[in-house]
Image: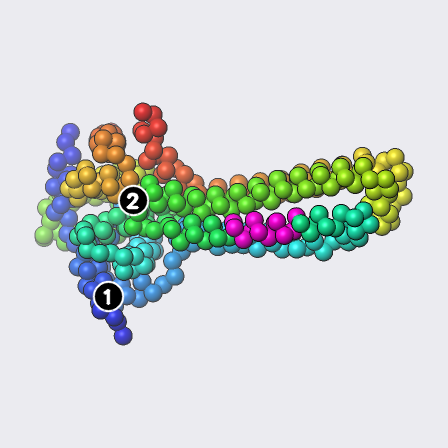
């Protein structure tokens, strides 16, 4: 069977009956875009806000007192400044990647650029998780090795624990918090970005399939 | 009050809108979705029109932006119904102008293309529109050799759907 006949039928197809007037087209161009990129940008911005808020809340914690007692405040402040600098850099890259997305690019480049916008946010989240883990571990080691550090950590809590249990309890609580946080993040990403990026990933794979096989 | 740029754009768009309608027909299944996609394409075209320098024809540029929007930017709205009813084809055919066999062939063709993946849709569409391989490879961002191989596969797939 040949496609020629079908192609002929295609060529002879009549023009659209519901043609739009210039005015109708003009009205359309004034509407807000609801593209995938726009969604990724909005959700990405919300994520940045979420992490900024989280860092802010964490900084307000009464733990500061403990750290002050242990003379760790200086280092805590350094990590905050560094955190803000990194956040600023991420925001710049995020915004630049977003504005570089152009529907005039070829399809492959366009998809690549859209995925890059999303990746910027992903790396920021990774950076946050990793830096939180690293900072927590370092401070825990410092606190555990400082004489009286553990006692200072728990003295504000209204619980009665055997001082020999401090370290176990401390580590357990950190591990549980991490697991809950990571579980929540994973679910969030899996659902949200899974849905948003499914089409893009599928199409990108389809476009690059043969090139990679070579 | 429209600027000269807007005026030119609307004139170009109005004359060439059939291209966008065809893209909407192959990428969507009902009138609501058709209009949705049409609007998003119109937004994208206008957003980039100031950068359009006329190095290529307006229509060539339109193919690219329209396909890009359908493949990468358009998010199916929740109201999109996932049925493919032949009678729902979002255009009506004036029977006196159009041969019966061809009408059936055209409808079968649309139904078949709608069953293909997004990239194959683009390939077949550009083939039906008689676009040279150079333009197809430029539009999709793949090599010309790759475009030929993919095109042959897409055509085979299309034949299979049309004549199982």
Q: Quadrant of residue B123?
A: top left
**Residue B132 coordinates in the image, percent (x, y):** 16, 40
- In the rendered image, is residue B160 in sight? no
| Residue placed under numbered mark 1 in the picture | B5
Residue at left offset 70%, top offset 49%? A76
Q: Of helix, strand and loop, which one carries label 1?
A: helix
Per the rendered image, the range of residues in magenta is A79-90
Q: Which disc, if any, is residue A106?
A: 2
Prevailing secondary structure of the magenta residues: helix
Q: Which chain contains the residue that carries disc 1?
A: B
> Which residue extends farthest top?
A214
On the rendered image, what quadrant is the N terminus of chain A found in?
top left
Residue B45 appears left or right of A145: left
Let me know if residue B157 is in the magenta part: no
Q: For this rendering, which residue is in front, B19 or A55? A: A55
Q: Of helix, strand and loop, which one carries label 2?
A: loop
Residue at left offset 19%, top offset 55%? B54
Q: Which chain contains the residue that carries disc 2?
A: A
Q: Residues within 10 Å of mark 1 (few under 14, many from 20)?
A: few
**Residue A136 coordinates in the image, percent (x, y):** 70, 41
Q: For this rendering, which residue is in front, B21 or A54? A: A54
Residue A130 appears left or right of A72: left
Residue at left offset 24%, top offset 56%? B52
């Amino acid at each position: 069977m040949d496609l020629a006949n079908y192609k002929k039928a295609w060529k002879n197809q009549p023009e659209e009956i519901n043609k739009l007037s210039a005015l109708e087209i003009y009205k359309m161009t004034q509407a807000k875009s609801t593209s995938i990129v726009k969604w990724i940008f909005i959700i990405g911005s919300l994520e940045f806000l979420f992490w900024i808020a989280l860092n802010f809340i964490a900084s307000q914690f009464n733990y500061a007192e403990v750290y002050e007692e242990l003379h760790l405040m200086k280092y805590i402040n350094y990590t905050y400044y560094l955190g803000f600098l990194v956040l600023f850099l991420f925001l710049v890259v995020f915004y630049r990647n977003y504005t570089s997305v152009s529907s005039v690019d070829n399809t492959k480049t366009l998809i690549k650029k859209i995925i890059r916008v999303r990746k910027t946010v992903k790396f920021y989240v990774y950076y946050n998780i990793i830096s939180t883990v690293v900072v927590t571990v370092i401070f825990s080691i410092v606190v555990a090795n400082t004489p009286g550090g553990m006692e200072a950590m728990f003295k504000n809590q209204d619980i009665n624990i055997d001082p020999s249990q401090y370290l176990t309890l401390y580590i357990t609580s950190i591990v549980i918090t991490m697991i809950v946080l990571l579980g929540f993040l994973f679910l969030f990403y899996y659902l949200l970005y899974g849905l948003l990026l499914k089409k893009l990933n599928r199409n990108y794979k389809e476009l690059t399939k043969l090139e990679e096989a070579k | 009050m429209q600027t000269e740029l807007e005026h030119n754009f609307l004139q170009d768009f109005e004359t060439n809108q059939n291209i966008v309608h065809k893209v909407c027909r192959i990428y969507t299944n009902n009138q609501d979705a058709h209009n949705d996609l049409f609007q998003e394409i119109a937004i994208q075209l206008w957003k980039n029109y100031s950068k359009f320098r006329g190095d290529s024809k307006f229509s060539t540029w339109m193919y690219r932006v329209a396909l890009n929007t359908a493949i990468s930017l358009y998010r199916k709205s929740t109201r999109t119904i996932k049925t493919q009813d032949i009678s729902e084809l979002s255009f009506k055919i004036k029977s006196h102008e159009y041969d019966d066999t061809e009408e059936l062939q055209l409808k079968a063709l649309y139904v078949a293309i709608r069953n293909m993946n997004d990239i194959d849709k683009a390939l077949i569409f550009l083939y039906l529109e008689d676009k040279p391989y150079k333009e197809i490879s430029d539009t999709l961002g793949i090599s010309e050799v790759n475009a030929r191989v993919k095109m042959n596969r897409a055509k085979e797939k299309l034949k299979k759907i049309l004549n199982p």
